[in-house]
Image (cartoon, rainbow, N blue to C red):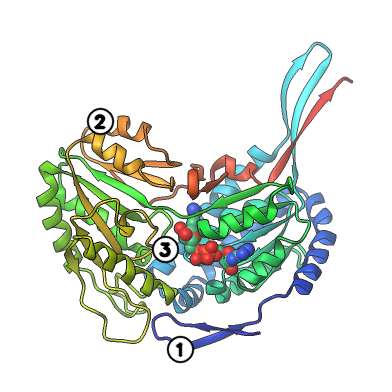
Amino acid sequence: MNISITNPATGQAIGTLNPATAATVQQLYTAAKAAQPQWAATPLSHRLACIARFHALLEEQLEALALTLTSETGKPLQQARNEINGARGRIQYFLQHSEKYLGEEWVTTEGLTKEKITYEPLGVIANISAWNYPYLVGVNVFIPALIGGNAVLYKPSEYATLTSRHIHRLLLQAGVPEGVLQLVEGNGTTGAALLQLPLDGYYFTGSHATGQKIATALAGRMVPLQMELGGKDPLYVMDDVADIKAVADAVLEGVMYNAGQSCCAVERVYVQAGVYDAFCTAIQAAAAAIKTGDPLAPDTDLGPLTRREQVGLLQAQVADALEQGAQVLFQAPAVPQAGNYFPLTLLTGVHHGMRIMHEESFGPVVGIQKVQDDQEATALMNDTEYGLTAAVYGQSAERAAAIMAHMHSGTVYFNCCDRVSASLPWSGRKHSGIGSTLSYQGIRAFVQPKAWHWRG
Ligand code: NAD
């Protein structure tokens, strides 16, 4: 049955998708399986040249691609451009470093025996992806997987179908053979059908709830499974901050960039008592200056949410907090137009018994809690099922480093937040995921090592 694709800013239909059935995914798999050995046998330099052409095509077609991305996700147009350029930066990293990390390595010589490691592709892998940053979370997987010699069944989110069609088209135009990259359009039912195939690896970006279903379906399969899941990321403002206004601006950006729909968005804020009032005043003033509205307007900071259901979830989280005694520090006026808009909302007087402080929100809302010292902040920051990122703001590097060393998260930030680097591993702990993308670990995540013991 066809699914309608709607523009989240207007509610208007802008396309349709016809989800791939179990029979279709089987055909796509058969074609990918047939095409993969030849792709793996091409020199790495050829595969890199294809990806370099894709990189150039993204630049050439940036404006049209950004418009499509904004039309189906609702993100402000400048943020759509930023996303595509950010993805180009990551591709550049893979282009520059893959030869080094995929080449053979002679490691030791013991007597007559020489020893080396080579890296071989896994085969045919699935890339089941999220909608919030389709370019960024996509390139983390399909680029190193293709460079490594794999075939990829690319299953984008049903909320990023139009963008995924562009990505697929441009990769083929860049020289990736048709069988090697298969676009698998569809929703969760299509994703579940991929789990029934005898694939050589599964790479998932999405929610913890879906991740659990995937892990359960694949239990006992003995193939690589990587998961980049959700977060409830904390940020702590220490009382020795130099410029409280600058910190408030940075925190607000971390809360509401991409309408808060970032896995590493700032979702909980802890502020030390000595600067609490000043911080609240500063972030309230910063929030008042945010412009919500049409994502195509050049001065819009905050657009609609991508998924309509998320509006109800955020309303419920805020209502639960208010019922339990939270106060509204700031709430933007409702946007007088159709679309999935949710007003930027800052709450104080929050505690961890409230949903807003322990469930992923994935929207432009945040709870701000007063703490007395680093010990209390550390305990509260770690009091979560998630473990993606954690941030500390202040002047004392020593205090910050002590807190950061105790964070149960894959990423820690000092005086920055909501940031991803191609050179560093992107990995979650606990309910935030398993395995790493990006960095050299994210190049090696799509190959398998072979150990050579060589006398001769
Ligand atoms: P989602 O879990 O709803 O969907 C993700 C993908 O899984 C989609 O392609 C969907 O069609 C597919 N899917 C759904 N049910 C499935 C099933 N039973 N079997 C197989 N596939 C299935 O997540 P979403 O709403 O697309 O993305 C938002 C979530 O992703 C948030 O929790 C966010 O934090 C997380 N995320 C994490 C990262 C990261 O790097 N850690 C990055 C981006 C998004």
Q: Amino acid at mark 2?
A: Arg
Q: Are marks 1 and 2 in contact (CB under 8 Å)?
A: no
The disc at residue 300 is none
Nearer-N-terminus badge (2/3) = 3
The N terminus - image quarter:
bottom right
Q: Secondary structure at mark 1?
A: loop
Using the numbered discs, state the Cα–Cα distance from disc 1 to disc 3 in whole angstroms: 25 Å
Residue 350 shows in the view: yes
The disc at residue 12 is 1
**Which residue is nearer to you in this view: 277 or 175?**
277
The residue pinned by badge 2 equals 399
Q: Residue 345 placed where, x, y %? A: 24, 66
**Which residue is nearer to you in this view: 52 or 9?**
9
Q: In percent of the image, x 38 and y 46: which residue is there? A: 384
Nearer-N-terminus badge (1/2) = 1
Using the numbered discs, state the Cα–Cα distance from disc 2 to disc 3 in whole angstroms: 33 Å
Q: In percent of the image, x 13 and y 48: which residue is there? A: 276
- Dot 3, crowdedness within 10 Å: few (<14), some or many (≥20)? some
Q: Is residue 30 positioned above or below 48 on the image?
A: below
Q: Residue 138 placed where, x, y %? A: 57, 60
